[in-house]
Image (spheres, grey):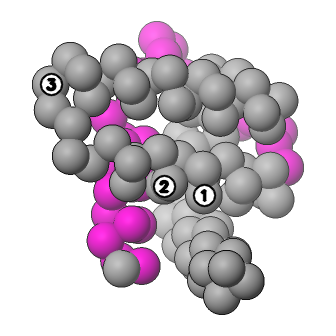
Amino acid sequence: MRKYLAGIGLAGLLSLPACGGKPAAPEFDEKQLISVLIDVHVAEAAAQNLRGRTKDSILNVYYEQIFQVHGMDRAAFEAAMESMREDPVRLEALYSEVMKEMERREAAL
């Protein structure tokens, strides 16, 4: 299940529309980014059976709610993820922390 959720989340992140131009390396809180990514994984899992424009619309609503809850805007999130993609070792470590936190939350249920 972990690999499945990670694949869904990563696919969803990669499908987010890219901003024009290359921003400067953003400053961001990795703990906040981990929380956002966990919520993105949950949103992607919730929408996995939807198709087409319905899925896109629902996911856009979910993403906006996630960003609002975490006090982050889409542009900041995309810039942070772009920065992480440029450093695969750091990205892998980030996703490792995401998976550990998801496992902790699942065990608490």
- Residue on which the image places disc 1: 38
Q: Nearer the viewer, residue 52 or 30?
A: 52
Picture coordinates of residue 79, whole percent (x, y): 62, 32
Q: Is residue 52 left or right of residue 103?
A: left
Does residue 63 appear in this view? yes
Up-down relation of residue 62 to residue 2 (above or below): above
- What secondary structure is found at the residue carrying circle 3? helix
The disc, 1 or 3, on the residue closer to the chain's N-terminal end is 1
Up-down relation of residue 46 to residue 103 (above or below): above
Residue appearing at x 70%, y 58% in the figure = 34
Q: Nearer the viewer, residue 37 or 107?
A: 107
Measure the C-alpha gap from mark 2 to mark 3.
19 Å
Q: Nearer the viewer, residue 37 or 78?
A: 37
**What's the magenta region?**
2-29
Measure the C-alpha gap from mark 2 to mark 1.
5 Å
- Residue on which the image places disc 2: 41
Up-down relation of residue 75 to residue 4 (above or below): above
Query: In the rendered structure, are the residues bearing label 1 and label 3 in contact, judged by CB atoms less than 8 Å apart?
Result: no
Amino acid at dot 2: His
Picture coordinates of residue 107, whole percent (x, y): 66, 88
Q: Which circle marks residue 52 in the picture?
A: 3
